[in-house]
Image (cartoon, rainbow, N blue to C red):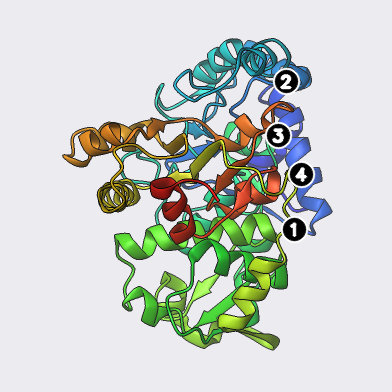
Amino acid sequence: MKLTEQQQAILDGKSGETLAKVMETLVRYGELFGAEEMVEITSDYNHLVTSFGLKALAPVYGLLQQLIDANEPSKQKFSADPRPLDPKVPSSFLQDFVFKNFMYSKQDEYEKQLQKLGLMNDDAFTCTCYMNEVGNTPKKGDILSWSESSAVVYANSVLGARCNRNSGIIDIMGSVCGFVPKFGFLTDEGRKAKWIVEIKTTKKPEAQLLGSAVGMKVMEDVPYVVGLDKWLDGTLDDNAKTYLKDFGAATASNGAVGLYHIEGITPEAVEQGRALIAEGAQTYVIDDAELQRVYDSYPVIWKNKDAKPKLCFMGCPHMSLEQLKSWTKKIDAGLKENGQTKVQIPTVFTASPGVIKKFEECEEAALLKKSGVILSYICPLMYMNNPLSEKIPVITSSNKLRTYTSARYYTDAEILDQLVKGGK
């Protein structure tokens, strides 16, 4: 790898032993992927995937302490993924015991480390850091050092920033050093599409279901999606961004997609069109039957497949302000139609602290509280990682949560039906 004079000096230890180790790690990481140079991070903020104080992450805490002791904080302020616990979310005494004593016992100490290293603020815990209410929205062309898969795919695709699917700790190393290796999505060639995905459905496809289909088909490759623009009204407005947030999270978790292009919608597709498609690209056609096939393929891993749902999680990734408002209205209308006053299944809506504060200023907030829905900043995935949580029949419309946990997937319409009428 060719390094600049400044980068070589860091590697040689001119800025201290700790920073030299960080640079060496990044150089080795880049060389594994064929990077020939390092490039400067240009975004205003970073985002970290590791937000949870797992007892098993002792080596991570030791590494971060070395950075703190050497006075090498992040060169950018950063946000982090959601907190793993919230007392508002229903849990049993035994679940709480496992959470606090065997899983996230280091949470308070870890958050103190993050604050010393450059955490944006105490509310900067969310997987949707790019939302206006959070304040970590990269600009088109910005070079990032992020690692949260759903945030990376959104930044690359919807915002036109440039970031690889890094791992935890690599994210903060890039930010501490100020450089990342140039390969993959940081290059023009790496952003070319190897798949053309043709949408031929008779109605607007469910974002999470469509993303799942695309992710499982193209895996880590870049898809160029044709025919979705008509269902998004041909514009990248707040509704389209919310849709693509959920679509992208499913492509990234059900596959390993880090970038997609939506013809006529996403920035690079608008600017470059089909010039983004690589020679020899394969084609994948998605119609109603294909989406049904994908839906039917999901396994139900509950011990009792016919169990009545005991909990519903919505918001993985975190819900947008628009989603909170629209879901509140749908639930309110559904309850009234069915002669109910409260949701029939304990339900948790999750969103970033910033979005929650904004929502609480809206008239819909009182309606949601009246319906019995709990509004939380929690990470549903971290909640479900508790072995005792796995035994609970949980439903969700998040394909990410379905993929990584025992939660059972239903479409938005099916979820709403169960919430206002009762579980199946």
- Viewer-proximal residue, 234 or 135? 234
Residue 390 is marked as 3
Mark 2 lies on a secondary structure that is helix
Whole-angstrom CA distance, mark 2 to mark 3, is: 31 Å
Q: Are marks 1 and 3 in contact (CB under 8 Å)?
A: no
Give the mark nearest the N terminus, 2 or 3: 2
User: Few, some or many C-alpha atoms within 10 Å of disc 2 (few <14, some 14-19, many ≥20)?
Assistant: few
Check disc 3 and give the amino acid type: Glu
Residue 141 seen: no
Q: Which residue is mark 1?
A: 36
Give the mark nearest the N terminus, 1 or 3: 1
Mark 3 lies on a secondary structure that is helix
- The image quadrant that residue 22 belongs to is top right
Check disc 1 and give the amino acid type: Glu
What x and y, as percent, mark residue 167? Answer: 70, 42
Mark 4 lies on a secondary structure that is helix
User: Few, some or many C-alpha atoms within 10 Å of disc 1 (few <14, some 14-19, many ≥20)?
Assistant: some
Q: What residue lies at 30% left-to-right and 47% top-to-bottom? A: 335
Q: Which residue is mark 2?
A: 63
Left or right: 14, with 337 as reference point = right
Check disc 4 and give the amino acid type: Val
Give the mark nearest the N terminus, 2 or 1: 1
